[in-house]
Amino acid sequence: MQLAERITTSKDAGLGNLLAAPKKNQVSFAGGLPDPLLFPQAELNAGFNRALAGTAAALQYASAAGYAPLRNQLATRLRQDGVPACTDSVLITQGAQQALDLIGRLTLDAGARVIVEGPTYPGALAALGTYQPKFCTVPVQEDGMDMAQLATTLARGGVRLIYTVPDFQNPTGTVMSLQKRQQLLALARKYDVLVLEDAPYRALRYRGTNLPTLRELDQDDRVLHVGSFSKILAPGLRLGWVTGAQDIIDRLVQLKSNSDLESSTLTQRAVSDYLANNDLDAHIKTLRRIYARKCTAMVATLQKHLPASVHVSNPDGGFFVWVELPPELNAEEILARVKDEVTFVPSTTLYPDQNVKNGMRIAFTNPDVAAIRRGCVKLAHGICAEIENAEGNYRVASTM
């Protein structure tokens, strides 16, 4: 039986493992899962009930672009954040993940070059990788993507797409500076390249003030801005969105129609009802307060139990803490040592070439504070044991 070449050559991104439930007595820092205790379950239940009770249209086929009242509500929220949007320029997708897939389908041929941050979101590598591009990795610095390296990569030609998470980057938690946002857009304009701005964490800032989105700063309609309800309401809703230039959105609507006809009409109506009858911003404020506490607990515990040779990030928002180990250490070996008690994402999963081994993505949003502290102590012990083992091997080698 013959399968498509793109399937036989594709790699498993391991997304199923990231989202798997933890085993008994195991603390999982692997998946970027929200805290289920914070889902507005009663309010969403009321929204579904009203959507079902109101009209049979909630159960009927509808527009591939999405439920118009929900698109209008999203456009209003986007404009409040400085993003130019109207009802027609918003496409509802099956989570942000489908938006990435549709954009990849629209822009990529086999062998086309895609610039991604290093490290980056493994789901983006999976979605875009389906179309067999050549990934070009640009390192992430403390203030975002390395612009000198980005310019060098673009100058080589053949780039179709730049993928970036400017706000609380997955996995490092960094925020791209305003200067770099402007530089990125200038380079994209110079080399006539589309930019995919993935912004699932933008609303979850715990300290400081948000910078303008790339889409707000965009002067020539080359930024596609992607968002999601997964992090701010519930991932089980599977609702995301993309907005950008109208001609590109129209093409994406056609691709979505060809793929799955539409996202769930019932779910869209229920979420629209939720937005009409509840205060989403108040809910997000609660998320910020609780997630900030969890982030603080994780960073403080790791810093307390780890040596200075291990760098622990202290993000201003988002879902993740980034741990950078001494270069001689392998995070996969540490995971093998501690996986019965604690899990995380090793950096090999977060690079297209899987060639960087000394990093860890650690999610703080799902476990409670006590579990975070317990898991971080276990993880720190595993890291320290691996450091001692590496130092012992070095001493032995140096005496031979």
Image (cartoon, grey):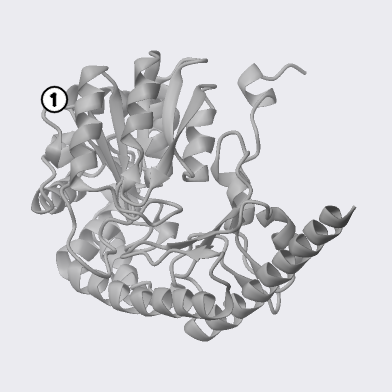
Q: Choose between 5 and 91: the one closer to the eye.
A: 5
Please state if 126 lies on the left or on the right of 104 as rendered: right
Left or right: where 84 falls relative to 364: left
Q: Give neighbour class at mark 1: few <14, some 14-19, many 20+ (Cα, 10 Å).
A: few
Q: Position of residue 360 (x, y in %)?
A: 57, 57
Q: Tag 1, which secondary structure?
A: loop
Position of 4 relative to 62 (above/below): above
Q: Position of residue 159 (x, y in %)?
A: 38, 19
Q: As drawn, is 20 to the left or to the right of 259?
A: right
Quarter of the image with the N terminus in it: top right
Q: Quadrant of residue 67?
A: top left
One can see residue 239 in this view: yes
> In the image shown, does 49 or 151 lie closer to the viewer?
151
Q: Can you give x and y, in whole percent of width and height, for residue 244 in the image?
A: 20, 33
Q: Which residue lies at the image location 25% right of the left edge and 33% below the top edge?
A: 184
When the figure is inspected, residue 308 is found, relative to residue 145, above or below; the finding is below
Q: How many numbered circles does the render carry?
A: 1
Looking at the image, the residue that sits furthest to the front is 399
Q: Would you identify the image quadrant in which residue 275 lies?
A: bottom left
Position of residue 9 measured from the top left corner of the image (x, y, whole percent): 67, 24
Label 1 is placed on what type of residue? Asp
The residue positioned 29% from the left and 78% from the top of the image is 289
- Which of the 4 quarters of the picture holds residue 385? bottom right
Is any atom of residue 214 visible in this view? no
User: Which residue is label 1 attached to?
Assistant: 220
The reply, left or right, for residue 343 in relation to residue 57 is right
Q: Looking at the image, which residue is at 29% across and 25% down?
A: 194
Give above or below for 93 relative to 371: above
Of residues 16 and 219, which is closer to you in this image? 219
